[in-house]
Image: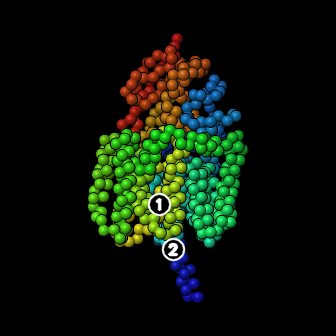
């Protein structure tokens, strides 16, 4: 009886400590989010989501339609200013996920984007809590895993902007926890069904959730088969697939009701068709998203990234208690690469750190600590075996301008849990804490970059909106997407390529526009124009890291 009461008291104290940790982390993330400018974003994707929230708020409805001011003369939307806008019936859709937008809409109506950002903050909190729970299931205390994910990983950065990454990450972490429980004798089929549901919910936001769900389900089935439970493997694997299918179907139904088509299903199937294409590009971008601390894609930086990843794995191996090899040479070599990365920042300014190993270096240590523990092997297998599949289907062309391997966040989080649970000797703990601190420093750089980028783009887009030209034509539709809600009020178009500029000239003539501003990145080349239009003025607008936009004022032909 005494033992039971003591156990209950210990459990209560653990939950009190957890609640305190969550409260502190929540305050930290809210404070950091307030540093960012609400008029700028870490990604153009966020601009589309915020514009959708604003459109819903203004109309007081639930339709994600953004509208289009030039629809009468450009009915197919070939000049629509925001990249990746889909025209479905009479709606113009730029949102890539509806569930998160609907969850955030009441908050947005109450307090704008600063309140809506509480949704990704909650995602980061749940991801950190999931990392702690998973590490405890792997026989660690979970405290270090909680704080690494909370304040020293990409989840920290994605909590500061209205992006879905932290929410999807949280769902997938808890899905893996349920899959691990289902692989034991414990909760069984119900846990498997719950894991499938969580992966399905995550897939409504992040397409890589389908890959991770497939690998987790396969790992569950293999583990049960190895333990000579084939019928159980079939039942629990089927339950997991059913849970995922149920949520995937529910999201598709939501999209059909709100939009008239299933945008997430279309995006996922399109990625499946493209899997394995452009092999050279995929290998290069796998290195960038997996390891690189550089916002560069040249061969020398790719090679340095591979070397850095290898050094981190070797550092983890040498940190094992039975190893007597010195740590100094490895640390010195890592320091040299860090120095090169710092010089790159000094010369080029703050920018994205695109690689997971660079932003969450603890994850690489785990690869040297996957020991005989079957649970750790199970979790590590999901993390590692998913990587090549994700790299096969991830979008190409956008690896450098992202933070911390956004397609493979779950792998990093799972490996952090493994490392924190396995690296418990005095030698290993020192290495773990040192590497975790390095990740914390990188995260602080990410916070600074988020603040700088959001402020810079907010100022630039506001300046563009205040210009005197009747219409602005953007050469790059990603730039207009940075404006977020401005696209609802401004007469903007996008025209990339010679044919598009000719079409823009015809559309502007049909609208009776006699003066426009053509917006493009200033790369020192001759300014682009519309066919027949005359250049009357030219100006430049500063962006981040020394880059500029060039705005060429054009007059219509007589």
Where's residue 78, x and y in %? 59, 28
Image point 39% across, 29% down: which residue?
523
Q: Residue 157 shows which numbered tag?
A: none
Quarter of the image with the N terminus is bottom right
Q: Is residue 490 above or below residue 298?
A: above
Depth check: give the residue in front, 129 or 37. 129
Q: How crowded is mark 1: few (under 14 residues within 10 Å), some or many (20 or more)?
A: many
Give the image quarter of residue 326.
bottom left
Q: Going by the image, does 87 lie left or right of 208?
A: right
Circle 2: element type: helix
Does residue 398 appear anywhere in the picture?
no
In terms of secondary structure, where does tag 1 sit?
helix
Please identify, in this view, whether the residue under mark 2 or under mark 1 is nearer the observer: 1
- In the drawing, does residue 171 fall left or right of residue 311? right
Residue at image point 62% right, 72% down: 185
Q: Position of residue 3 (x, y in %)?
A: 55, 86
Q: In this view, does 551 lie above or below 427?
A: above
Closer to us: 462 or 541: 541
Q: Where is residue 451 in the image (x, y as percent from the top left)?
A: 42, 47
Residue tagged 1: 415
Residue found at the very far bottom of the displayed protein: 1
Q: Residue furthest top?
A: 558
Give the residue number, with chain letter if any, for mark 2: 14
- From mark 2 to mark 1, how far is it between C-alphas? 23 Å
* Mark 2 or mark 1, earlier in chain: 2
């Amino acid at each position: 009886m005494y033992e039971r009461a003591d156990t209950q008291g210990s459990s209560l104290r653990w939950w009190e400590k957890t609640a305190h940790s969550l409260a502190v982390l929540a305050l930290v993330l809210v404070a950091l989010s307030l540093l960012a400018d609400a008029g700028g974003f870490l990604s153009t994707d966020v601009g589309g989501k915020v514009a959708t929230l604003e459109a819903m708020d203004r109309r007081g409805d639930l339709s994600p339609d953004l509208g289009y001011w030039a629809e009468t003369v450009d009915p197919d939307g070939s000049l629509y200013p925001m990249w990746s806008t889909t025209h479905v019936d009479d709606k113009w859709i730029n949102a890539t996920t509806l569930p998160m937008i609907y969850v955030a809409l009441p908050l947005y109506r109450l307090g704008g984007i600063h309140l809506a950002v509480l949704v990704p903050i909650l995602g980061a909190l749940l991801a950190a809590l999931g990392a702690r729970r998973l590490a405890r299931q792997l026989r660690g205390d979970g405290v270090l895993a909680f704080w690494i994910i909370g304040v020293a990983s990409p989840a920290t950065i994605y909590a500061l902007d209205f992006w879905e990454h932290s929410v999807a990450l949280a769902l997938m972490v808890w899905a893996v926890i349920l899959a691990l429980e289902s692989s034991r004798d414990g909760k069984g089929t119900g846990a498997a069904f719950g894991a499938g549901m969580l992966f399905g919910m995550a897939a409504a936001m992040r397409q890589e959730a389908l890959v991770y769900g497939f690998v987790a389900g396969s790992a569950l089935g293999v583990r049960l088969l190895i333990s000579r439970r084939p019928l159980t493997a079939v039942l629990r694997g089927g339950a997991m697939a059913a849970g995922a299918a149920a949520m995937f179907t529910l999201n598709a139904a939501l999209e059909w009701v709100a939009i008239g088509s299933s945008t997430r299903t279309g995006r996922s199937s399109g990625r499946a068709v493209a899997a394995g294409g452009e092999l050279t590009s995929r290998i290069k971008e796998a290195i960038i998203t997996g390891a690189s601390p550089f916002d560069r894609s040249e061969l020398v930086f790719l090679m340095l990234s591979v070397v850095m990843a290898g050094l981190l794995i070797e550092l983890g191996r040498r940190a094992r208690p039975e190893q007597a090899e010195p740590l100094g040479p490895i640390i010195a070599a890592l320091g040299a690469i860090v120095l090169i990365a710092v010089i790159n920042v000094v010369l080029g300014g703050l920018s994205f750190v695109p690689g997971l190993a660079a932003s969450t270096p603890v994850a690489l240590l785990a690869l040297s600590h996957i020991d005989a523990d079957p649970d750790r092997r199970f979790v590590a297998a999901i993390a590692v075996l998913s990587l090549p599949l994700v790299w096969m289907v991830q979008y190409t062309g956008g690896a450098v301008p992202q933070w911390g391997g956004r397609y493979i966040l779950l792998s990093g989080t799972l490996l952090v849990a493994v490392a924190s649970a396995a690296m418990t000797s005095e030698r290993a703990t020192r290495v773990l804490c040192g590497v975790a601190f390095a990740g914390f420093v990188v995260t602080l750089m990410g916070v600074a970059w988020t603040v700088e980028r959001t402020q810079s783009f907010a100022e630039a887009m506001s300046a563009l909106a205040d210009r005197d030209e009747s219409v602005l034509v953007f050469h790059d539709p990603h730039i207009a997407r940075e404006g977020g809600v401005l696209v609802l009020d401004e007469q903007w178009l996008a025209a990339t390529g010679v044919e598009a500029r000719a079409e823009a000239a015809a559309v502007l003539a049909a609208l009776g526009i006699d003066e426009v501003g053509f917006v493009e990145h200033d790369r020192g080349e001759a300014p682009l124009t519309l066919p027949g239009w005359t250049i009357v003025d030219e100006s430049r607008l500063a962006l981040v890291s020394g880059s500029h936009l060039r705005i060429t004022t054009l007059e219509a032909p007589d």
